[in-house]
Amino acid sequence: MTPRPFRNNRPLQGLILWLVVLWIITAIEPFNRRDWLLENLLVFIYAALLVVTYRRFAFTNLSYILFGAFISLHLVGAHYTYAETPFGFWLQNTFDLSRNHYDRIVHFAYGLLNAYPFRDIFMRAAGVRPSWSYFLPVVAVLAFSTFYEFLEVAVMTIVSPELGAIYLGTQGDIWDAEKDAFLAFCGAIIAMSIVWLYNKRHRRLKAAAHA
Protein backbone atom coordinates (compact mmCIF):
# COMPACT_ATOMS: atom_id res chain seq x y z
CA MET A 1 0.00 0.00 0.00
CA THR A 2 1.46 3.34 -1.08
CA PRO A 3 1.54 5.79 1.84
CA ARG A 4 -0.24 9.09 1.51
CA PRO A 5 2.43 11.79 0.90
CA PHE A 6 3.23 13.43 4.20
CA ARG A 7 2.61 16.91 2.76
CA ASN A 8 -1.04 15.92 2.14
CA ASN A 9 -1.60 14.10 5.42
CA ARG A 10 -3.08 16.83 7.64
CA PRO A 11 -4.04 14.56 10.56
CA LEU A 12 -0.50 13.19 10.78
CA GLN A 13 1.00 16.67 10.53
CA GLY A 14 -1.25 17.84 13.36
CA LEU A 15 -0.28 14.83 15.47
CA ILE A 16 3.43 15.48 15.00
CA LEU A 17 2.95 19.15 15.90
CA TRP A 18 1.12 18.12 19.07
CA LEU A 19 3.88 15.70 20.08
CA VAL A 20 6.65 18.25 19.42
CA VAL A 21 4.86 20.89 21.51
CA LEU A 22 4.18 18.39 24.31
CA TRP A 23 7.80 17.21 24.23
CA ILE A 24 9.04 20.80 24.55
CA ILE A 25 6.68 21.48 27.47
CA THR A 26 7.64 18.29 29.30
CA ALA A 27 11.33 18.98 28.66
CA ILE A 28 11.13 22.16 30.75
CA GLU A 29 12.40 21.53 34.27
CA PRO A 30 11.49 17.84 34.64
CA PHE A 31 11.53 16.45 38.18
CA ASN A 32 14.69 14.46 37.48
CA ARG A 33 16.69 15.46 34.40
CA ARG A 34 18.71 12.25 34.20
CA ASP A 35 15.61 10.07 34.50
CA TRP A 36 13.89 12.22 31.88
CA LEU A 37 16.78 11.70 29.48
CA LEU A 38 16.76 7.96 30.10
CA GLU A 39 13.00 7.70 29.63
CA ASN A 40 13.19 9.68 26.39
CA LEU A 41 15.97 7.53 24.99
CA LEU A 42 13.46 4.83 24.04
CA VAL A 43 10.99 7.46 22.78
CA PHE A 44 13.60 8.76 20.34
CA ILE A 45 14.20 5.23 19.03
CA TYR A 46 10.44 4.60 18.80
CA ALA A 47 9.82 7.85 16.89
CA ALA A 48 12.83 7.34 14.61
CA LEU A 49 11.55 3.91 13.55
CA LEU A 50 8.16 5.36 12.63
CA VAL A 51 9.79 8.13 10.57
CA VAL A 52 12.24 5.81 8.78
CA THR A 53 9.56 3.25 7.89
CA TYR A 54 6.93 5.77 6.70
CA ARG A 55 7.75 5.45 3.00
CA ARG A 56 8.02 1.66 3.03
CA PHE A 57 5.13 0.98 5.37
CA ALA A 58 2.73 3.72 6.36
CA PHE A 59 0.37 2.80 9.15
CA THR A 60 -3.22 3.95 8.99
CA ASN A 61 -3.85 7.37 10.52
CA LEU A 62 -5.79 5.65 13.30
CA SER A 63 -2.67 3.66 14.19
CA TYR A 64 -0.54 6.82 14.23
CA ILE A 65 -3.09 8.53 16.49
CA LEU A 66 -2.97 5.57 18.86
CA PHE A 67 0.84 5.70 18.82
CA GLY A 68 0.63 9.41 19.55
CA ALA A 69 -1.71 8.91 22.49
CA PHE A 70 0.65 6.38 24.04
CA ILE A 71 3.72 8.58 23.52
CA SER A 72 1.83 11.50 25.10
CA LEU A 73 1.14 9.47 28.24
CA HIS A 74 4.79 8.45 28.35
CA LEU A 75 6.08 12.01 27.95
CA VAL A 76 3.99 13.15 30.92
CA GLY A 77 5.30 10.26 33.01
CA ALA A 78 8.88 11.03 31.98
CA HIS A 79 8.49 14.66 33.05
CA TYR A 80 7.29 13.91 36.58
CA THR A 81 8.83 10.40 36.87
CA TYR A 82 6.15 7.73 36.86
CA ALA A 83 6.02 7.43 40.65
CA GLU A 84 5.45 11.19 41.10
CA THR A 85 2.85 11.94 38.44
CA PRO A 86 0.07 14.22 39.83
CA PHE A 87 -2.76 12.31 38.15
CA GLY A 88 -1.53 9.14 39.80
CA PHE A 89 -1.53 10.85 43.19
CA TRP A 90 -5.07 12.11 42.54
CA LEU A 91 -6.21 8.55 41.87
CA GLN A 92 -4.35 7.34 44.94
CA ASN A 93 -6.04 9.89 47.19
CA THR A 94 -9.47 9.60 45.60
CA PHE A 95 -9.70 5.81 45.74
CA ASP A 96 -7.46 5.29 48.78
CA LEU A 97 -4.92 3.27 46.80
CA SER A 98 -1.64 2.01 48.23
CA ARG A 99 0.58 3.62 45.56
CA ASN A 100 0.74 5.94 42.58
CA HIS A 101 -0.67 3.83 39.73
CA TYR A 102 0.16 6.09 36.79
CA ASP A 103 2.76 3.60 35.58
CA ARG A 104 0.12 0.86 35.64
CA ILE A 105 -2.17 3.05 33.52
CA VAL A 106 0.55 3.59 30.92
CA HIS A 107 1.38 -0.12 30.72
CA PHE A 108 -2.31 -0.94 30.30
CA ALA A 109 -2.49 1.78 27.64
CA TYR A 110 0.47 0.20 25.84
CA GLY A 111 -1.63 -2.87 25.14
CA LEU A 112 -4.86 -0.97 24.56
CA LEU A 113 -3.34 1.56 22.15
CA ASN A 114 -0.70 -0.52 20.37
CA ALA A 115 -2.58 -3.74 19.66
CA TYR A 116 -4.40 -2.20 16.70
CA PRO A 117 -1.17 -0.96 15.03
CA PHE A 118 0.28 -4.44 15.53
CA ARG A 119 -2.78 -5.82 13.74
CA ASP A 120 -2.13 -3.27 11.00
CA ILE A 121 1.33 -4.80 10.51
CA PHE A 122 0.15 -8.41 10.61
CA MET A 123 -2.69 -7.81 8.15
CA ARG A 124 -0.91 -5.66 5.59
CA ALA A 125 2.77 -6.62 5.81
CA ALA A 126 2.58 -10.27 6.82
CA GLY A 127 -0.68 -11.14 5.09
CA VAL A 128 -2.13 -12.79 8.18
CA ARG A 129 -5.65 -14.17 7.86
CA PRO A 130 -8.38 -12.14 9.55
CA SER A 131 -9.11 -14.98 11.98
CA TRP A 132 -5.52 -14.79 13.29
CA SER A 133 -5.32 -11.02 13.18
CA TYR A 134 -7.04 -10.68 16.56
CA PHE A 135 -4.89 -13.22 18.37
CA LEU A 136 -1.39 -12.39 17.14
CA PRO A 137 -1.41 -8.71 18.25
CA VAL A 138 -2.23 -9.84 21.81
CA VAL A 139 0.71 -12.25 21.74
CA ALA A 140 2.97 -9.56 20.26
CA VAL A 141 2.01 -7.04 22.95
CA LEU A 142 2.73 -9.56 25.70
CA ALA A 143 6.07 -10.48 24.12
CA PHE A 144 7.16 -6.87 23.63
CA SER A 145 5.99 -5.89 27.11
CA THR A 146 8.04 -8.66 28.66
CA PHE A 147 11.04 -7.77 26.49
CA TYR A 148 10.66 -4.10 27.45
CA GLU A 149 10.88 -4.96 31.15
CA PHE A 150 14.22 -6.71 30.52
CA LEU A 151 15.32 -3.83 28.26
CA GLU A 152 14.57 -1.29 30.99
CA VAL A 153 16.85 -3.10 33.41
CA ALA A 154 19.59 -3.40 30.78
CA VAL A 155 19.39 0.31 29.83
CA MET A 156 19.41 1.36 33.48
CA THR A 157 22.38 -0.88 34.28
CA ILE A 158 24.44 0.34 31.33
CA VAL A 159 23.50 4.02 31.18
CA SER A 160 22.63 5.09 34.72
CA PRO A 161 22.56 2.35 37.40
CA GLU A 162 22.31 4.89 40.24
CA LEU A 163 18.79 5.88 39.16
CA GLY A 164 17.57 2.41 40.07
CA ALA A 165 13.97 2.37 41.28
CA ILE A 166 13.34 5.95 40.10
CA TYR A 167 13.67 4.86 36.48
CA LEU A 168 12.02 1.48 36.90
CA GLY A 169 9.18 2.92 39.00
CA THR A 170 8.75 -0.25 41.04
CA GLN A 171 7.73 1.66 44.19
CA GLY A 172 8.85 -1.27 46.32
CA ASP A 173 6.82 -3.91 44.46
CA ILE A 174 8.97 -6.94 43.61
CA TRP A 175 6.30 -8.14 41.14
CA ASP A 176 6.10 -4.78 39.37
CA ALA A 177 7.45 -6.06 36.03
CA GLU A 178 5.07 -9.02 35.93
CA LYS A 179 2.07 -6.83 36.77
CA ASP A 180 3.04 -4.29 34.10
CA ALA A 181 3.28 -6.96 31.41
CA PHE A 182 -0.03 -8.49 32.51
CA LEU A 183 -1.80 -5.13 32.32
CA ALA A 184 -0.49 -4.57 28.79
CA PHE A 185 -1.76 -8.06 27.93
CA CYS A 186 -5.22 -7.17 29.31
CA GLY A 187 -5.25 -3.90 27.37
CA ALA A 188 -4.47 -5.75 24.13
CA ILE A 189 -7.27 -8.27 24.77
CA ILE A 190 -9.76 -5.44 25.28
CA ALA A 191 -8.57 -3.62 22.16
CA MET A 192 -8.85 -6.68 19.94
CA SER A 193 -12.23 -7.56 21.42
CA ILE A 194 -13.49 -4.10 20.47
CA VAL A 195 -12.07 -4.40 16.96
CA TRP A 196 -13.58 -7.87 16.54
CA LEU A 197 -17.02 -6.70 17.70
CA TYR A 198 -16.83 -3.64 15.44
CA ASN A 199 -15.85 -5.71 12.40
CA LYS A 200 -18.53 -8.29 13.17
CA ARG A 201 -21.19 -5.59 13.33
CA HIS A 202 -19.84 -3.97 10.16
CA ARG A 203 -20.07 -7.30 8.28
CA ARG A 204 -23.64 -7.79 9.48
CA LEU A 205 -24.68 -4.32 8.31
CA LYS A 206 -22.93 -4.85 4.99
CA ALA A 207 -24.65 -8.21 4.48
CA ALA A 208 -28.02 -6.69 5.37
CA ALA A 209 -27.49 -3.89 2.88
CA HIS A 210 -26.81 -6.40 0.08
CA ALA A 211 -29.70 -8.65 1.05
Image (cartoon, rainbow, N blue to C red):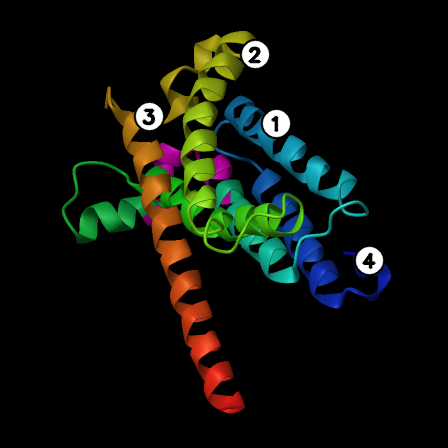
> Badges 3 and 2: C-beta atoms under 8 Å apart?
no
Q: Residue at x 69, y 65 (%)?
A: 11
Tell me the residue that label 2 is attached to.
159
Q: CA distance from mark 3 to mark 4?
A: 38 Å
> What label does residue 41 carry, if any?
1
Tell me the residue that label 3 is attached to.
177
Q: Residue at x 14, y 46 (%)?
A: 96
Of the residues tagged 4 and 2, which is closer to the observer?
4
Residue type at the position of mark 3: Ala
Q: CA distance from mark 4 to mark 2?
A: 35 Å
x, y percent for residue 186: 32, 45
Of the residues tagged 3 and 2, which is closer to the observer?
3
Residue type at the position of mark 2: Val
> Badges 3 and 4: C-beta atoms under 8 Å apart?
no
Q: Please, is residue 1 above or below residue 50 in the view? A: below
Crowd class of label 1 (few under 14; some 14 to 19; many from 20; radius 10 Å): few
Q: Which residues are magenta?
A: 76-87
Crowd class of label 2 (few under 14; some 14 to 19; many from 20; radius 10 Å): few
Q: Provide the secondary structure element on which disc 1 rests.
A: helix
Is residue 2 or residue 83 the one in the foreground? 2
x, y percent for residue 16: 70, 53
Horizontal side of residue 62 vs 3, given as left or right: left
Sequence-wise, the earlier of marks 4 and 1 is 4
x, y percent for residue 101: 29, 41
Tell me the residue that label 4 is attached to.
6
Q: Provide the secondary structure element on which disc 2 rests.
A: helix
> What label does residue 189 carry, if any?
none
Q: Please, is residue 165 above or below residue 143 in the view? A: above
